[in-house]
Image (tube, rainbow, N blue to C red):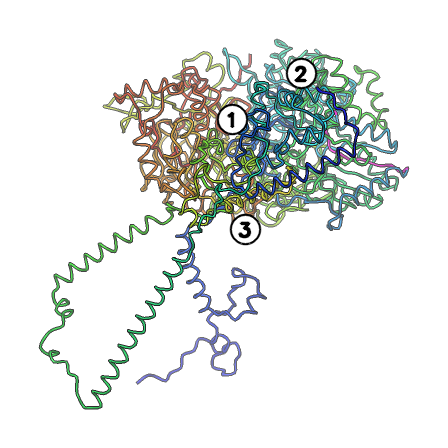
Amino acid sequence: MASNKKYWKSEAELNPNDSIVEALRQNEFVEDIPVDEFLGDKETLESTNTNRRDFLKYVGFSTAAASLAACEGPVIKSIPYVVAPENIVPGVANYYATTIANGFDFASILIKTREGRPIKVENNKEAKVAGSANARVQASVLSLYDSTRLQGPKSGAGDDVSWDVIDAAVKSKLGSGKQIALLTQTYASPSTSRLLEELKAAYPTVNHVTYDAISEEAALSAFEAKYGERALADYNFENADIIVSFGADFLGDWQGGGYDSGYSKGRVPKNGKMSKHVQFEANMSLTGANADKRVALSSQFQKVALAYLYAKLNGTNAGGELPADAQKVLDILIAQIRKNKSGAVVVSGIDDINVQTVVLAINEMLGSKAFDSKAPRYTRQGNTKAVQSLIADMNAGKVGALIIDGVNPMYSLPNAAEFKTGIENVGLSVTFSTNWNETSAVSTYAAASNHYLESWGDAQIKKGHYSLMQPTIKELFDTRQFQASVLKWMGNDKSYYDYIKETWNTFVLNGSDFNKAIHDGVFVAGGDAIVNDAAELVAMATTASEEADTVIDEEQMMSSSTSISSAVRSLASATGADGMELTLYSKVGMGDGQQANNPWLQEFPDPITRVSWDNYVTVSKADAQTLGLINENVANGGLDGSYANLTVNGIPVNNVPVIIQPGQAKGTAGLSFGYGKKAGMKSEMQTGVNAFALYQDFNNIQSVKIEKAVGMHEFACVQLHKTMMGRGDIIKETTLEIFNTKDHAEWNHVPVVSLNHQEVPATSVDLWDSFDRSIGHHFNMSIDLNACTGCGACVIACHAENNVPVVGKQEVRKSRDMHWLRIDRYYSSEDTFEADDIEKDDADGVGLGNYMFGDREGDGSLSTFDRLEEPSANPQVAFQPVMCQHCNHAPCETVCPVAATSHSRQGQNHMAYNRCVGTRYCANNCPYKVRRFNWFLYNNNDEFDFHMNNDLGKMVVNPDVNVRSRGVIEKCSMCIQKTQKSILDAKRDGRPVADDEFQTACSSACSNGAIVFGDINDKESEVAELKESDRMYHLLEHVGTKPNVFYHVKVRNTTEA
Amino acid sequence: MKKVTYRNQISKVLGISLVVFLLSSISLFAQNEVVAEEPAATEDASSGDAVKGKQLFNQNCAACHALNRKMTGPALANVEARLAEDEGLDREWLYAWIKNSPGMIKSGDAYAVKIYNEYNQAAMTAFPTLSNADIDNILAYTVPVIDNGGEKETKTIPIVSNEPGISNEIILGALVLVFALLVMMLFLVNKTLRRIAEANGVVVADENAEERTPIWKAFAKNQFLVLCTVIFLLLGSGYFAYGWMMQVGVDQGYAPIQPIHYSHKIHAGTNKIECKYCHSSARKSKHSGIPSLNVCMNCHKSIYEYTGVAGEAPSQEDLANGYTNDFYTGEIKKLYAAVGWDEENQKYTGDTKPVEWVRIHNLPDFAYFNHSQHVEVGKIECQTCHGPVEEMEIMYQYSPLTMGWCINCHRETNVQVEGNEYYAKIHEELSKKYGVETLTAAQMGGLECGKCHY
């Protein structure tokens, strides 16, 4: 009955000899299933005769076996010490004071160690100078456990060698008569300076050249010309009433950074006063974002403006044309400065000796209280001329041996190619570094150097302010620090520790106890004489190599007054670059790129653009339109941007992703250093492009040609909405004038709801019975939006304290970032946030017609909201750290089907990970979006190669906090492990808890005082006082969640009188 | 000090020392046969009371000295005679030395300096409180008694041999064999009979096959009964399955074999060593901590062998388990090997082999437990959770360590608020709120998830 009709799918089937048809008939899948990709490598697979059935059997068996095995607990071994060190109690953390001085970051810090493992960086509150750790310093503890570190000395070809080989090679060169060049980072170290001086005395051919990847040459030379010492003026912005900055990102890495805590102290309105900060800049920097008034200007106009300021303050006229708005701002400023000369301070980040000279002259002239030239900073010592002449010497074959420490010139020199030919002409080159890098690859030997947490050392960050570096762990690998090596080469049997001790006892301590100095980590010299002694030590190393450029110095020293007037003249007549102006800068996350292999820093979102895992060229919206560059959001929520090719002086950097940056001055572009590193890096970390190639003549301002390139770049951006669209209850803002004159109900409006036809404050209405929290501790956190600069140290501190996983670029792009604490950044759509509110309130009707068919300029709400989504060309910026708000009426708790999240009487919202089944209802119901879901197992997983998949990286894990597994929600716990510890310590001692004992990771990391944590049931506590402040408000108060985190209204000082 | 006349007569000294050496070695051998050294009060020890001396010796000297063994300090058997003969030092010198040895080293006494240097420059503690009479007593104790075998407890304790065990097994085996044979024979007989019957044409018919329904069929037909049985079986299996599953991961009674047989019974029971002497971090840390080996060596530097409980012979049970004195001494030797202690020279060799203990009490990672909170603040006895450790020959997990067990205790246990300033305010307020004088951990918030899970 069956039909004999033959059905065919293609004509080829009719041909019985067609091999393809035969193959198709035999194989279920046309293409081979790439089983080897997920099962193992091809060869072993082919050599076995496992078929699919066997495979299924194995799967079945292993599943059964695994589930059976799970019933039996594993045997866990415990290995106690043979001889326990006296000061280590398992389970109790020890803290050691030390110092980071890696040539870019200088800070006195405390290291928390557990069972001998450094796990966390804390601020050293004893330190009067640079006692706070920024995001990079906070993250540096992870770099210690980087599995890609050099584990022993190697040859340039990558083969292991012994230290003896390197020592013998260097020793043989030392006496050879040819120049022995030391190319090093800035040490600012009295002991290292003394050591290198001794080396020079023993071997006169030694030439020490200090090199900063990101140079402060202009500022150093200007300071030297004026004050005779190669150093940087110190500023204490706390003392300033008026801060004027011309392109100085002093809340970032300007002149070594570390100025933010002083700045923040002056920003909190006290007795109706706060400092006023005006920023003239091209890029939207962290500093500009915090300014009361920001004027977007290219560097050309910044120079003219500076000249104008100088001239006006002197009562003369400098000439030069300025845009009208800048002129207006300047005129108001000048009037204000005239009234309060010593309260004003001027800074600039333009790499131009004229600019820096004028800045010093203005501050000197004003007698600024915030300006300190007597005790300057030594955190940058680099000498670009000496570096260039060294490269020339190398190429000329004059250098017998080159020893490099702490710098990576092959990566960070703009003329790296020249350096490469030079190093090939050098008989012996030894590069000290912790990781294999571009320079190690071209050196004769790559000497494995200690991480700073394994090293001895010292630093004089500011004149008279000394700090000591002590190892917090024994060397993990066969490494040796540079200074110990120099001692060895000199035939000195002393350890570097003894050498430091000797230096300190002789030159620094003046009879004080060395052990106490080690314990404190810092030492402040009392007498002037001693200060100068040791300062000379630091200066010694640089002065000797500066002989080459004394001519210029003398010229400048000749007559400072004439040089200043000529400097001002040249500034006033500054001309614009042809093409666009490129400002090179460093990000607070990456700095000069030393820690590019650190996943915490890679995943740290830039505070301004909120982009992680990338650098990019920032352009203004207007320029983007001209150049045809776009940013767009794609369907999965990711941000895409065009590529552009950058050319500076004929040197191209191609395929740079583009970010359209609100506030970028028209005609300018920005690009950050620190990315584009390749050598010795994990593949995931090889992100971005290398901006150092464009760093011609070590000048951060370059003339650039930008062209659109093909393709779109996929960014991992964590914040896609840019503005608040007039929702003034997220970030409340006011001006100092209103703050001082009006009642707080007016500028800190509490939302109202209708209850029994009466408008009552939303906070007074309650759906639930309130829980009694008056007994015991009730934790609250205060976040002052005036003090927060958005620096992000808290984000990394939270990472380290709470074992927050790193998820990688692709996951971040899918909005699966795991940060418990984020710092939201909002732009205003109008010129100010206030204007946004007015615009929104003025919206009238829906305005569909205008929206659909009109010009969208109508005042219907559709058009209005559409406009409000776009930030203005020069927006106001506000930062807001947001973590779990620990609501007393938490929406997350009511929707959890398994009661995994619940409330405590101490005010913390608990999250029991072991109870969570991963429904994510809580995350959906959270109005603050602070709950994070573990989409994958991030530790022990080679798909997430971010140090947590190897034993070394896991040493950074905090043993007091759970490492979460796949499928559970996690979130900020308000560092319950820390509060519980403080309580237990007090219980054990039988005493009440002191106020400052209660800390979270973020509050203790915040040296700006923006985050304050404590117990509001302790009426004496700082946080209880802050809660009573008029500026206090809760985020989304009208939702009625009653959070235990509160914010302080941001006040901007816009006074013009 | 008396003047010694023959100080320079080296040959004489050598000769005498040879004699002394021979004598002492004899005494050594002699003592080896004696299990418990009980030097009797002998008259030649010039009026000392050896019994009192023993007591004093154990109190003051035993930490660093043994009679016949070099320890932190030299062996003291016959010390007076030895000194007199070797060095020509008399009892006066000994008085001075014992009462103020550091002083003598300082004053440069030749032998004092020599002995100081010989023993790693570890100065002997001065005992100014000992009277001359006390020292006489001690010295009397140090004079060895040459015992002539005698009836002293030469413990040839009958080894409660394993023979009964072995014979039991043999008997059992034999019985099993016999039974097996019987079964086989029955089977064979039955088969043979059937074959014979078949051969003879006898048909073995099931007579009642047709008439009576088999009981299982009757059962199957009674649906009510089937239902009841099914429900019963389901409930029963559910009960047992639940019970079985609830014990998954609960290791109550877990008593792994440890690399060194450490007896809590001997240490905490017999010798009444306080738990927190060894587990000192329980006072200030979340971990009670397994003591580091240097803590063991605080005592075991001088306790180099196990001699059993004073006045008691090892129990039959111990012996049956193989816990003889030699066994324990062997375990002490394991400790020495691990810590790198050279018994001969009383020195650490530096060659250590850290001990890999098997962890008994394992809490999952997601549960936070802090010993100091319970031990120091809560003043809870270790035994509350760890059971009668002082009776445990092999340490085992006493409590289930489940969450229910924790919670129950938190509900029932009162917080130790007295005398703790921390609780002053909170206690006052809470007791007002709940109207009670004592507060349980639960009332203090000890049941909140986040107190243990973070």
Within-10-Å neighbours for mark 3: few <14, some 14–19, many 20+: few
Query: Disc 2 designates what residue?
Result: A371
Residue situated in front as seen by the camera: B29 or A169: B29
Q: Is residue A886 above or below residue B321?
A: above
The spot of residue B228 in percent (x, y) is: 15, 58
Residue situated in front as seen by the camera: A68 or A403: A68
Question: At 12% from the left edge and 69% from the top edge, which residue is drawn?
Answer: B218
Element at label 1: helix
Task: Determine which of the numbered discs, if any, sits on residue B52 in the image.
Answer: 1
Element at label 2: strand
For this view, does A710 lie left or right of residue A557? Answer: left
Residue situated in front as seen by the camera: A842 or B214: B214
Q: Residue A531 sits in which quadrant?
A: top right
**Residue type of the residue flagged with mark 3:** Asp
**Residue type of the residue flagged with mark 1:** Lys
Given the image, what chain letter belongs to the residue carrying mark 2?
Answer: A
Quadrant of the drawing holding the C terminus of chain A: top right
- The single residue placed furthest to the left in the displayed view is B211
Labels 3 and 1 touching (C-beta < 8 A): no
Question: At 30% from the left edge and 70% from the top edge, which residue is drawn?
Answer: B179
Segment tinted magenta in the rendering: A177-190
- The single residue placed furthest to the right in the displayed view is A177
Residue situated in front as seen by the camera: A941 or A877: A941
In the rendered image, residue A899 lying in the magenta stretch gets the answer no
In the rendered image, residue A188 lying in the magenta stretch gets the answer yes
The spot of residue A251 in percent (x, y) is: 60, 26
The spot of residue A909 in percent (x, y) is: 38, 32
Task: Determine which of the numbered discs, if any, sits on residue A942 in the image.
Answer: 3
- The single residue placed furthest to the top in the displayed view is A339
